[in-house]
Image: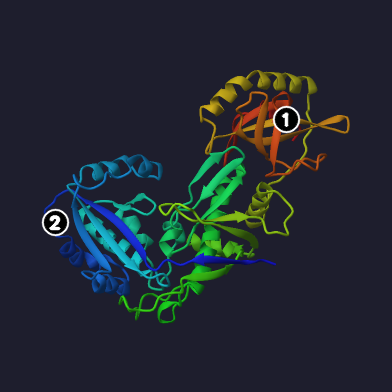
Amino acid sequence: MGTTLVLPVPETLLAVYVVPSPTADVDPEAVLRDGLGILADDRLRDLVGQLLGTPLLQIVAVDAADAPPPPYELLAAFGATPEALDQLRGAAVHLLVQAHFRPGWPPMHEWAARAAAAVLASALGQPIVDILVPRVLPADAALRSLPDEHGQFRLADWVLVPCSAGRRGLLFTTKGLGRFGLPELQAEDVPPQLERPWAMAFTGLAQALVHGWFAVAGAPASGGSAAGDGVDGVDPSEGAPGPAPFVELDDVVPVSSDDIAIAYGRPPPEPRVEVAVRLLFDPTPDPGSDDFLTVAPPLDVGSSAGEFFAAVCAALFGASADEVRQPRDHSAMEAAMAAARAELPEVRARFLRGELLHARQLIVKYRLDVDGGNEYVWAFVTAWEDPARIVGTSANDAHHDPTVRVGRTVYVDAEAVVDWAVWVDGEGIVEGGATNAHLED
Protein backbone atom coordinates (compact mmCIF):
# COMPACT_ATOMS: atom_id res chain seq x y z
CA MET A 1 0.00 0.00 0.00
CA GLY A 2 1.55 3.28 -1.09
CA THR A 3 1.17 6.84 0.09
CA THR A 4 0.65 10.08 -1.79
CA LEU A 5 3.22 12.46 -3.20
CA VAL A 6 2.20 16.13 -3.25
CA LEU A 7 4.13 17.88 -6.01
CA PRO A 8 4.14 21.57 -6.92
CA VAL A 9 3.05 22.52 -10.44
CA PRO A 10 4.79 25.48 -12.11
CA GLU A 11 2.54 28.29 -13.30
CA THR A 12 4.30 28.36 -16.67
CA LEU A 13 7.02 26.39 -18.43
CA LEU A 14 9.77 27.89 -20.56
CA ALA A 15 11.57 26.25 -23.49
CA VAL A 16 14.82 27.83 -24.68
CA TYR A 17 16.93 26.85 -27.70
CA VAL A 18 19.85 28.61 -29.36
CA VAL A 19 20.69 28.46 -33.06
CA PRO A 20 24.12 29.90 -34.00
CA SER A 21 24.17 32.01 -37.14
CA PRO A 22 27.43 32.53 -39.02
CA THR A 23 26.20 35.96 -40.19
CA ALA A 24 24.53 38.83 -38.39
CA ASP A 25 22.60 39.69 -41.55
CA VAL A 26 19.67 37.40 -40.87
CA ASP A 27 15.94 37.98 -40.32
CA PRO A 28 15.05 34.96 -38.18
CA GLU A 29 11.27 35.36 -38.40
CA ALA A 30 11.41 35.62 -42.21
CA VAL A 31 13.71 32.58 -42.41
CA LEU A 32 11.38 30.67 -40.13
CA ARG A 33 8.20 31.51 -42.05
CA ASP A 34 9.87 30.61 -45.35
CA GLY A 35 11.06 27.27 -43.97
CA LEU A 36 7.93 26.05 -42.16
CA GLY A 37 7.18 23.70 -45.03
CA ILE A 38 9.80 21.22 -43.80
CA LEU A 39 7.63 20.41 -40.76
CA ALA A 40 5.86 17.18 -41.62
CA ASP A 41 2.78 17.74 -39.44
CA ASP A 42 0.37 20.42 -40.69
CA ARG A 43 -0.92 21.08 -37.17
CA LEU A 44 2.56 21.66 -35.79
CA ARG A 45 3.31 23.95 -38.71
CA ASP A 46 0.10 25.90 -38.00
CA LEU A 47 0.94 26.06 -34.29
CA VAL A 48 4.35 27.66 -34.91
CA GLY A 49 2.85 30.09 -37.44
CA GLN A 50 0.08 30.99 -35.00
CA LEU A 51 2.41 31.62 -32.04
CA LEU A 52 5.25 33.34 -33.91
CA GLY A 53 5.36 37.03 -33.13
CA THR A 54 3.25 36.66 -29.98
CA PRO A 55 4.66 36.77 -26.44
CA LEU A 56 4.34 32.96 -26.36
CA LEU A 57 7.02 32.36 -29.04
CA GLN A 58 9.82 34.84 -29.58
CA ILE A 59 13.11 34.81 -31.47
CA VAL A 60 15.82 37.25 -30.43
CA ALA A 61 19.16 37.76 -32.19
CA VAL A 62 21.96 38.29 -29.67
CA ASP A 63 25.44 39.32 -30.74
CA ALA A 64 27.77 36.43 -29.96
CA ALA A 65 30.23 38.79 -28.29
CA ASP A 66 27.53 39.86 -25.83
CA ALA A 67 26.07 36.40 -25.18
CA PRO A 68 27.24 34.15 -22.33
CA PRO A 69 29.68 31.57 -23.75
CA PRO A 70 28.15 28.12 -24.19
CA PRO A 71 29.34 25.42 -21.73
CA TYR A 72 31.62 23.77 -24.29
CA GLU A 73 33.03 21.06 -22.00
CA LEU A 74 29.57 20.06 -20.77
CA LEU A 75 28.19 20.00 -24.31
CA ALA A 76 31.08 17.78 -25.38
CA ALA A 77 30.42 15.45 -22.44
CA PHE A 78 26.81 15.16 -23.62
CA GLY A 79 27.87 14.14 -27.12
CA ALA A 80 28.51 17.34 -29.07
CA THR A 81 30.89 16.76 -32.00
CA PRO A 82 33.98 18.93 -32.51
CA GLU A 83 32.42 20.22 -35.75
CA ALA A 84 29.27 21.36 -33.94
CA LEU A 85 31.32 23.08 -31.23
CA ASP A 86 33.33 24.88 -33.95
CA GLN A 87 30.06 26.14 -35.44
CA LEU A 88 29.09 27.53 -32.04
CA ARG A 89 32.45 29.23 -31.63
CA GLY A 90 32.23 30.74 -35.12
CA ALA A 91 28.76 32.24 -34.70
CA ALA A 92 28.25 35.94 -35.34
CA VAL A 93 24.90 35.97 -33.55
CA HIS A 94 22.95 33.56 -31.38
CA LEU A 95 19.30 33.21 -32.34
CA LEU A 96 17.50 32.72 -29.04
CA VAL A 97 14.23 30.83 -29.49
CA GLN A 98 11.92 31.00 -26.46
CA ALA A 99 8.40 29.73 -25.89
CA HIS A 100 6.31 29.46 -22.75
CA PHE A 101 2.97 27.93 -21.89
CA ARG A 102 1.11 26.43 -18.96
CA PRO A 103 1.82 22.81 -17.90
CA GLY A 104 -0.41 20.15 -19.39
CA TRP A 105 -1.01 18.28 -22.59
CA PRO A 106 0.24 19.01 -25.17
CA PRO A 107 3.59 20.56 -24.07
CA MET A 108 3.14 23.35 -26.62
CA HIS A 109 6.06 25.45 -25.44
CA GLU A 110 8.52 22.65 -26.18
CA TRP A 111 6.95 21.54 -29.44
CA ALA A 112 6.77 25.09 -30.80
CA ALA A 113 10.25 26.15 -29.65
CA ARG A 114 12.04 23.01 -30.86
CA ALA A 115 10.16 23.05 -34.16
CA ALA A 116 11.05 26.71 -34.74
CA ALA A 117 14.70 26.13 -33.80
CA ALA A 118 14.88 23.06 -36.07
CA VAL A 119 13.53 25.02 -39.04
CA LEU A 120 16.02 27.86 -38.46
CA ALA A 121 18.93 25.48 -37.98
CA SER A 122 18.04 23.53 -41.12
CA ALA A 123 17.84 26.70 -43.19
CA LEU A 124 21.15 28.04 -41.85
CA GLY A 125 23.00 24.70 -41.89
CA GLN A 126 23.64 24.93 -38.15
CA PRO A 127 23.03 22.79 -35.05
CA ILE A 128 20.72 23.58 -32.13
CA VAL A 129 21.62 24.00 -28.47
CA ASP A 130 18.95 22.70 -26.10
CA ILE A 131 19.59 24.99 -23.15
CA LEU A 132 17.65 22.98 -20.58
CA VAL A 133 19.80 19.82 -20.79
CA PRO A 134 22.18 21.26 -22.19
CA ARG A 135 23.15 19.44 -25.38
CA VAL A 136 23.71 20.03 -29.07
CA LEU A 137 21.23 18.59 -31.57
CA PRO A 138 21.78 18.38 -35.33
CA ALA A 139 18.87 19.98 -37.18
CA ASP A 140 17.73 16.68 -38.71
CA ALA A 141 17.74 14.97 -35.30
CA ALA A 142 15.65 17.79 -33.83
CA LEU A 143 13.14 17.45 -36.69
CA ARG A 144 12.89 13.69 -36.15
CA SER A 145 12.24 14.18 -32.44
CA LEU A 146 9.12 16.29 -33.02
CA PRO A 147 5.67 14.72 -32.43
CA ASP A 148 4.02 12.92 -35.32
CA GLU A 149 0.48 13.49 -36.57
CA HIS A 150 -0.86 11.62 -33.52
CA GLY A 151 1.15 13.65 -31.02
CA GLN A 152 3.48 10.71 -30.36
CA PHE A 153 7.14 11.30 -29.60
CA ARG A 154 10.09 9.32 -28.22
CA LEU A 155 10.75 10.45 -24.68
CA ALA A 156 14.38 9.31 -25.08
CA ASP A 157 14.81 12.23 -27.53
CA TRP A 158 13.73 14.74 -24.86
CA VAL A 159 15.12 13.31 -21.61
CA LEU A 160 18.74 12.33 -21.02
CA VAL A 161 19.93 9.83 -18.38
CA PRO A 162 23.46 10.76 -17.24
CA CYS A 163 25.22 8.72 -14.56
CA SER A 164 28.32 9.15 -12.44
CA ALA A 165 30.40 6.88 -10.24
CA GLY A 166 29.91 6.82 -6.49
CA ARG A 167 31.50 4.94 -3.61
CA ARG A 168 28.74 2.31 -3.47
CA GLY A 169 27.61 2.30 -7.07
CA LEU A 170 26.36 4.58 -9.81
CA LEU A 171 24.25 7.71 -9.42
CA PHE A 172 21.65 8.03 -12.16
CA THR A 173 19.68 11.20 -12.82
CA THR A 174 17.42 12.46 -15.56
CA LYS A 175 17.73 15.80 -17.28
CA GLY A 176 14.71 16.92 -19.23
CA LEU A 177 11.67 16.01 -17.13
CA GLY A 178 11.65 19.63 -15.96
CA ARG A 179 10.51 20.69 -19.42
CA PHE A 180 7.17 18.97 -18.65
CA GLY A 181 6.88 20.51 -15.17
CA LEU A 182 8.11 17.44 -13.29
CA PRO A 183 10.97 17.03 -10.81
CA GLU A 184 13.90 15.08 -12.21
CA LEU A 185 14.46 11.44 -11.25
CA GLN A 186 17.48 10.07 -9.41
CA ALA A 187 18.64 6.64 -8.29
CA GLU A 188 21.63 6.12 -6.00
CA ASP A 189 23.91 3.12 -5.48
CA VAL A 190 22.97 1.36 -8.70
CA PRO A 191 25.30 -1.64 -9.25
CA PRO A 192 27.83 -0.81 -12.00
CA GLN A 193 26.98 -3.96 -13.96
CA LEU A 194 23.47 -2.54 -14.48
CA GLU A 195 24.59 0.66 -16.21
CA ARG A 196 22.95 -0.13 -19.56
CA PRO A 197 19.80 -2.01 -18.45
CA TRP A 198 19.07 0.44 -15.64
CA ALA A 199 19.38 3.40 -18.03
CA MET A 200 16.65 1.76 -20.14
CA ALA A 201 14.50 0.94 -17.11
CA PHE A 202 15.00 4.50 -15.83
CA THR A 203 13.83 5.93 -19.15
CA GLY A 204 10.79 3.64 -18.98
CA LEU A 205 10.08 4.96 -15.48
CA ALA A 206 10.30 8.51 -16.84
CA GLN A 207 7.79 7.53 -19.54
CA ALA A 208 5.35 6.13 -16.97
CA LEU A 209 5.77 9.22 -14.82
CA VAL A 210 5.15 11.64 -17.71
CA HIS A 211 2.02 9.68 -18.70
CA GLY A 212 0.68 9.84 -15.14
CA TRP A 213 1.66 13.47 -14.78
CA PHE A 214 -0.23 14.62 -17.86
CA ALA A 215 -3.29 12.77 -16.60
CA VAL A 216 -3.44 14.88 -13.42
CA ALA A 217 -1.48 18.12 -14.03
CA GLY A 218 -4.05 19.64 -16.35
CA ALA A 219 -6.69 18.08 -18.55
CA PRO A 220 -5.50 17.04 -22.03
CA ALA A 221 -6.22 19.73 -24.59
CA SER A 222 -9.19 19.15 -26.93
CA GLY A 223 -9.86 15.64 -25.72
CA GLY A 224 -6.27 14.52 -26.22
CA SER A 225 -4.52 12.09 -23.96
CA ALA A 226 -1.03 11.34 -22.81
CA ALA A 227 -0.82 9.16 -25.89
CA GLY A 228 -1.61 12.31 -27.85
CA ASP A 229 -4.04 13.58 -30.46
CA GLY A 230 -1.98 16.41 -31.90
CA VAL A 231 -2.57 20.11 -31.29
CA ASP A 232 -5.96 20.68 -32.92
CA GLY A 233 -8.07 23.31 -31.26
CA VAL A 234 -5.47 24.38 -28.71
CA ASP A 235 -6.15 27.87 -27.48
CA PRO A 236 -2.77 29.48 -26.79
CA SER A 237 -4.27 32.54 -25.10
CA GLU A 238 -2.68 33.65 -21.87
CA GLY A 239 -6.08 33.70 -20.16
CA ALA A 240 -6.74 29.98 -20.55
CA PRO A 241 -7.18 28.19 -17.21
CA GLY A 242 -4.12 26.39 -15.91
CA PRO A 243 -3.67 23.39 -13.62
CA ALA A 244 -3.95 23.44 -9.86
CA PRO A 245 -0.81 24.62 -7.99
CA PHE A 246 -0.28 21.14 -6.54
CA VAL A 247 -1.07 17.62 -7.73
CA GLU A 248 -1.14 14.29 -5.95
CA LEU A 249 0.52 11.17 -7.34
CA ASP A 250 0.84 7.69 -5.88
CA ASP A 251 4.37 7.18 -4.58
CA VAL A 252 4.40 3.60 -5.96
CA VAL A 253 4.66 3.72 -9.75
CA PRO A 254 4.28 0.68 -12.02
CA VAL A 255 6.87 0.46 -14.81
CA SER A 256 6.38 -1.98 -17.66
CA SER A 257 8.24 -3.30 -20.65
CA ASP A 258 5.65 -1.38 -22.71
CA ASP A 259 6.78 1.90 -21.07
CA ILE A 260 10.38 1.19 -22.08
CA ALA A 261 9.36 0.34 -25.64
CA ILE A 262 7.24 3.51 -25.99
CA ALA A 263 10.04 5.69 -24.58
CA TYR A 264 12.40 4.40 -27.29
CA GLY A 265 9.83 4.24 -30.08
CA ARG A 266 9.91 0.44 -30.33
CA PRO A 267 7.14 -2.17 -30.62
CA PRO A 268 5.99 -3.46 -27.21
CA PRO A 269 7.54 -6.87 -26.42
CA GLU A 270 5.72 -10.05 -25.51
CA PRO A 271 5.03 -11.02 -22.85
CA ARG A 272 4.40 -7.75 -21.06
CA VAL A 273 6.32 -7.43 -17.76
CA GLU A 274 5.60 -4.92 -15.01
CA VAL A 275 7.45 -3.97 -11.83
CA ALA A 276 6.77 -1.35 -9.17
CA VAL A 277 9.11 1.27 -7.75
CA ARG A 278 8.64 3.77 -4.95
CA LEU A 279 9.38 7.49 -5.31
CA LEU A 280 10.47 9.90 -2.58
CA PHE A 281 10.16 13.64 -3.17
CA ASP A 282 13.41 15.49 -2.44
CA PRO A 283 12.86 19.22 -2.99
CA THR A 284 15.96 21.37 -3.22
CA PRO A 285 16.47 24.42 -1.00
CA ASP A 286 18.31 26.09 -3.90
CA PRO A 287 15.92 27.86 -6.32
CA GLY A 288 18.44 27.39 -9.11
CA SER A 289 18.69 23.60 -8.71
CA ASP A 290 16.40 20.73 -9.64
CA ASP A 291 13.95 19.02 -7.33
CA PHE A 292 14.23 15.24 -7.46
CA LEU A 293 12.10 12.16 -7.16
CA THR A 294 14.39 9.49 -5.69
CA VAL A 295 13.78 5.86 -6.64
CA ALA A 296 13.60 3.39 -3.75
CA PRO A 297 12.30 -0.17 -3.19
CA PRO A 298 8.62 -0.43 -2.19
CA LEU A 299 8.15 -0.73 1.56
CA ASP A 300 7.23 -4.41 1.31
CA VAL A 301 10.52 -5.26 -0.45
CA GLY A 302 13.04 -6.41 2.13
CA SER A 303 16.26 -5.88 0.23
CA SER A 304 18.94 -3.28 -0.29
CA ALA A 305 18.59 -0.72 -3.04
CA GLY A 306 21.27 -2.44 -5.13
CA GLU A 307 19.53 -5.80 -4.88
CA PHE A 308 16.23 -4.17 -5.78
CA PHE A 309 17.69 -2.51 -8.89
CA ALA A 310 19.16 -5.86 -9.93
CA ALA A 311 15.79 -7.55 -9.43
CA VAL A 312 14.02 -4.86 -11.49
CA CYS A 313 16.44 -5.31 -14.39
CA ALA A 314 16.20 -9.10 -14.15
CA ALA A 315 12.40 -8.92 -14.30
CA LEU A 316 12.35 -6.50 -17.25
CA PHE A 317 15.24 -7.88 -19.28
CA GLY A 318 15.88 -11.39 -17.95
CA ALA A 319 18.36 -12.70 -15.39
CA SER A 320 21.85 -13.79 -16.39
CA ALA A 321 22.86 -17.40 -15.89
CA ASP A 322 24.76 -18.18 -12.70
CA GLU A 323 26.62 -21.46 -12.36
CA VAL A 324 29.36 -23.09 -10.30
CA ARG A 325 32.37 -24.35 -12.25
CA GLN A 326 35.25 -26.38 -10.86
CA PRO A 327 38.96 -26.11 -11.74
CA ARG A 328 40.26 -28.74 -14.16
CA ASP A 329 43.88 -28.40 -12.97
CA HIS A 330 44.38 -27.26 -9.37
CA SER A 331 48.11 -26.55 -9.70
CA ALA A 332 47.54 -24.40 -12.82
CA MET A 333 44.72 -22.61 -11.03
CA GLU A 334 46.99 -21.80 -8.08
CA ALA A 335 49.60 -20.38 -10.46
CA ALA A 336 46.97 -18.26 -12.23
CA MET A 337 45.77 -16.87 -8.89
CA ALA A 338 49.32 -15.99 -7.85
CA ALA A 339 49.98 -14.20 -11.14
CA ALA A 340 46.70 -12.25 -10.88
CA ARG A 341 47.42 -11.21 -7.30
CA ALA A 342 50.87 -9.93 -8.30
CA GLU A 343 49.15 -7.56 -10.75
CA LEU A 344 46.71 -6.09 -8.23
CA PRO A 345 48.80 -3.00 -7.24
CA GLU A 346 48.95 -1.81 -10.86
CA VAL A 347 45.30 -2.70 -11.42
CA ARG A 348 44.33 -0.62 -8.38
CA ALA A 349 46.42 2.28 -9.68
CA ARG A 350 44.57 2.13 -13.01
CA PHE A 351 41.24 2.14 -11.18
CA LEU A 352 42.21 5.15 -9.07
CA ARG A 353 43.28 7.00 -12.24
CA GLY A 354 39.75 6.54 -13.56
CA GLU A 355 40.73 4.17 -16.37
CA LEU A 356 38.40 1.39 -15.22
CA LEU A 357 35.01 3.05 -14.82
CA HIS A 358 31.76 3.04 -16.80
CA ALA A 359 32.48 1.47 -20.22
CA ARG A 360 35.45 -0.54 -18.85
CA GLN A 361 34.64 -1.75 -15.35
CA LEU A 362 36.96 -3.46 -12.90
CA ILE A 363 35.76 -6.71 -11.35
CA VAL A 364 37.55 -8.88 -8.81
CA LYS A 365 37.10 -12.52 -7.86
CA TYR A 366 37.46 -13.17 -4.14
CA ARG A 367 37.35 -16.09 -1.73
CA LEU A 368 34.50 -16.76 0.68
CA ASP A 369 35.21 -19.14 3.57
CA VAL A 370 32.17 -21.42 3.82
CA ASP A 371 31.81 -24.61 5.92
CA GLY A 372 35.54 -25.27 5.98
CA GLY A 373 35.87 -24.78 2.22
CA ASN A 374 36.03 -21.98 -0.30
CA GLU A 375 33.59 -20.42 -2.72
CA TYR A 376 34.70 -17.82 -5.27
CA VAL A 377 32.46 -14.95 -6.43
CA TRP A 378 32.92 -11.81 -8.50
CA ALA A 379 32.27 -8.21 -7.46
CA PHE A 380 32.23 -4.95 -9.41
CA VAL A 381 34.63 -2.48 -7.78
CA THR A 382 33.15 0.90 -6.80
CA ALA A 383 35.85 2.18 -4.41
CA TRP A 384 39.40 1.13 -3.47
CA GLU A 385 40.97 3.97 -1.49
CA ASP A 386 42.38 1.62 1.17
CA PRO A 387 44.73 -0.89 -0.50
CA ALA A 388 43.54 -3.55 1.97
CA ARG A 389 39.78 -3.03 1.53
CA ILE A 390 37.63 -2.97 -1.61
CA VAL A 391 34.07 -1.68 -1.82
CA GLY A 392 31.93 -3.14 -4.56
CA THR A 393 28.63 -4.69 -5.56
CA SER A 394 28.22 -8.41 -5.88
CA ALA A 395 28.01 -9.77 -9.41
CA ASN A 396 26.70 -13.15 -8.20
CA ASP A 397 24.48 -14.78 -5.65
CA ALA A 398 26.76 -16.90 -3.49
CA HIS A 399 25.60 -20.53 -3.28
CA HIS A 400 26.78 -21.05 0.32
CA ASP A 401 26.63 -17.54 1.86
CA PRO A 402 23.13 -16.00 2.00
CA THR A 403 24.57 -12.55 2.79
CA VAL A 404 26.17 -12.27 -0.68
CA ARG A 405 23.50 -11.42 -3.23
CA VAL A 406 23.69 -9.87 -6.68
CA GLY A 407 23.52 -6.09 -6.46
CA ARG A 408 24.24 -5.98 -2.71
CA THR A 409 27.16 -3.88 -1.48
CA VAL A 410 30.14 -5.99 -0.41
CA TYR A 411 33.33 -5.13 1.46
CA VAL A 412 36.19 -7.32 0.30
CA ASP A 413 39.45 -7.97 2.10
CA ALA A 414 42.09 -7.48 -0.61
CA GLU A 415 43.92 -10.53 0.76
CA ALA A 416 40.93 -12.63 -0.34
CA VAL A 417 41.15 -11.48 -3.98
CA VAL A 418 42.34 -14.22 -6.32
CA ASP A 419 41.71 -12.65 -9.75
CA TRP A 420 40.78 -9.45 -11.53
CA ALA A 421 39.32 -8.59 -14.91
CA VAL A 422 38.07 -5.70 -17.03
CA TRP A 423 34.41 -6.11 -17.95
CA VAL A 424 32.74 -4.43 -20.94
CA ASP A 425 28.96 -4.63 -21.06
CA GLY A 426 27.88 -6.68 -24.07
CA GLU A 427 31.35 -8.20 -24.51
CA GLY A 428 32.16 -9.67 -21.11
CA ILE A 429 35.75 -9.99 -19.88
CA VAL A 430 38.16 -8.26 -22.25
CA GLU A 431 41.27 -8.26 -20.05
CA GLY A 432 42.47 -10.33 -17.10
CA GLY A 433 40.33 -13.18 -15.80
CA ALA A 434 43.30 -15.55 -15.78
CA THR A 435 41.54 -18.09 -13.56
CA ASN A 436 38.66 -18.58 -16.00
CA ALA A 437 40.91 -20.44 -18.43
CA HIS A 438 41.36 -23.20 -15.85
CA LEU A 439 37.69 -23.88 -15.11
CA GLU A 440 35.66 -26.81 -16.39
CA ASP A 441 33.01 -25.86 -18.97
In percent of width and height, residue 142 lies at 34, 58
Q: Name the residue under label 1.
A: 366
- Where is 75 relative to 174, above or below? above
Q: Nearer the viewer, residue 377 or 88?
A: 88
Can residue 134 be seen here? yes
SS at circle 2: loop
Seen as rendered, the residue at the extreme front is: 285
Q: Residue at x 29, y 73 (%)?
A: 47
The quarter holding residue 438 reads: top right
Seen as rendered, the residue at the extreme left is: 25
- Where is 220 relative to 74, above or below? below
First of labels 2, 1 by sequence position: 2
Whether label 2 touches label 1, CB < 8 Å: no
Q: Which corner quadrant holds the N terminus?
A: bottom right
Residue 196 shown left or right of residue 404 in the figure: left
Picture mark count: 2
Q: Residue at x 11, y 54 (%)?
A: 25
In percent of width and height, residue 111 lies at 35, 66
Cα–Cα span, label 2 and label 1: 65 Å
Q: Name the residue under label 2.
A: 26
Seen as rendered, the residue at the extreme right is: 372
Disc 2 residue type (three-letter): Val
Disc 1 residue type (three-letter): Tyr
In percent of width and height, residue 239 lies at 32, 78
The quarter holding residue 361 reads: top right
Looking at the picture, the colour scheme in use is rainbow
- Where is 371 relative to 177, above or below? above
Label 2 crowd (10 A; few <14 / some 14-19 / many >=20): some
SS at circle 1: strand
Residue 296 shown left or right of residue 358 in the figure: right
Residue 245 shown left or right of residue 239 in the figure: right
